[in-house]
Amino acid sequence: MQAVVQTIRDLVEIPSPTGFTAHALTYVENRFKEEGISYKKLEKGALLAMLPGESPRIRLLTAHVDTLGAMVKEVLPTGRLSLSQLGGYAWTAIEGENCLVHKMDGQTVSGTIVFHHSSVHTSRVTNTEERSATNIEVRLDIRSTTAEETRVAGIEVGDIVTFDPRFVHTETGFVKSRHLDDKASVALLLELVKKWKTLTLPHPVHILISNYEEVGFGGNAGFSEDVAEYIAVDMGALGEGQHSDEYTVSICAKDGSGPYDLALRHQFTRLAQQHTIPYKVDIYPYYSSDASAAVHAGHDVRHGLLGPGIESSHSYERTHETSLQATYDLLDAFVKEPMNDENTL
């Protein structure tokens, strides 16, 4: 897992909110080149890697490199910035976070995301007012007290704002960082291809690294009509009422988009049992994936979803090495087994 964790760190430290993913995709592309993996670039910017197999029927595994972030919505009269969200999260999840504003010229300006009435010494509403787009703002690390001064510094509406990931790998095996959704899964696939490229696989395995998942359309196009199984490798969302945890691979039975393919889900469960892989089956009520986006776009594929359990999703996230290992092991067992042709069980 040390290589997986290092790759996670590499990825989360490359800013890549939806719409600003070129640098992260270049990192993935270079990894494919280093391993001699055949791949192509799609028009939306995503990457599709291709490993050969014995059958013409293709298995597609996808993970997304795009993360949460923001855009400058307005340069305020105070010189601070208001934000428009990229992806869905609570404003409280980013309050107090350090950030970077990416200007059009490629340079960055640092800042901090703060509540407008952040000081309890000057306001009585600090602890009571709901955080929203109208009162969360970026305090820039430049000398600016007017909108004109901020604009002179080269900052304008539409500039990308990215959040400090604050990556930590603890001695107890926890990985803490923003953007583990879904860079933990991207890292797992990048490490697995090193192994899979040396094997004779029963089916070709295509790996789609998508870049618009957080806004709902990352993995719905650009892949072969011969894809029969489409597996999203994405986080298991933890919380009250959920079955998943940080120490197992999470297998999704159903999410907000509807049920996933029953035969695939049973295959994942059976493989986990056979290989003594710790797992949990779960239902995510407020969730969808690139696999469900592909099905909703009209693709005739059997779709599944599995991934590491991620605590505090779309906030400052955490998982454990054991969950990463379990996900790695289940994916490895899955691609080595021929397709199950049952449509229902």
Image: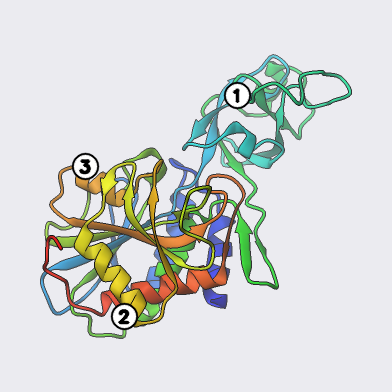
Q: Could you give the CA–CA distance between mark 2 and mark 1, rounded to whole angstroms?
A: 48 Å
Question: On the rendered image, what quadrant is the C terminus found in?
Answer: bottom left
Q: Earlier in the sequence, mark 1 or mark 3?
A: 1
Q: Could you give the CA–CA distance between mark 3 and mark 2, rounded to whole angstroms?
A: 31 Å
Give SS at disc 2.
Answer: loop
Tell me the residue at 12%/56% (across/down). 225
In the rendered image, which residue does mark 3 sit on? 296
In the rendered image, which residue does mark 1 sit on? 132
Q: Is residue 169 left or right of residue 273?
A: right
Q: Could you give the CA–CA distance between mark 1 and mark 3, rounded to whole angstroms?
A: 31 Å
Question: Quick one: label 3, few (<14), some, or many (20+) residues within 10 Å?
Answer: few
Viewer can see residue 121: yes
> Residue 327's x, y, as percent?
42, 69
The image shows residue 107, relative to residue 123, as above or below, that is below
In the image, farthest residue toward the front: 241
Identified by mark 2, the residue type is Lys
Front-lying residue, 145 or 289: 289
Front-lying residue, 144 or 345: 345
In the rendered image, which residue does mark 2 sit on? 197
Q: Is residue 292 left or right of residue 319?
A: left
Displayed quadrant of residue 328: bottom left
In the image, farthest residue toward the top: 77
In the image, farthest residue toward the right: 121
Q: Earlier in the sequence, mark 3 or mark 2?
A: 2
Tell me the residue at 10%/71% (across/down). 56
> Residue 97's x, y, as percent?
69, 41
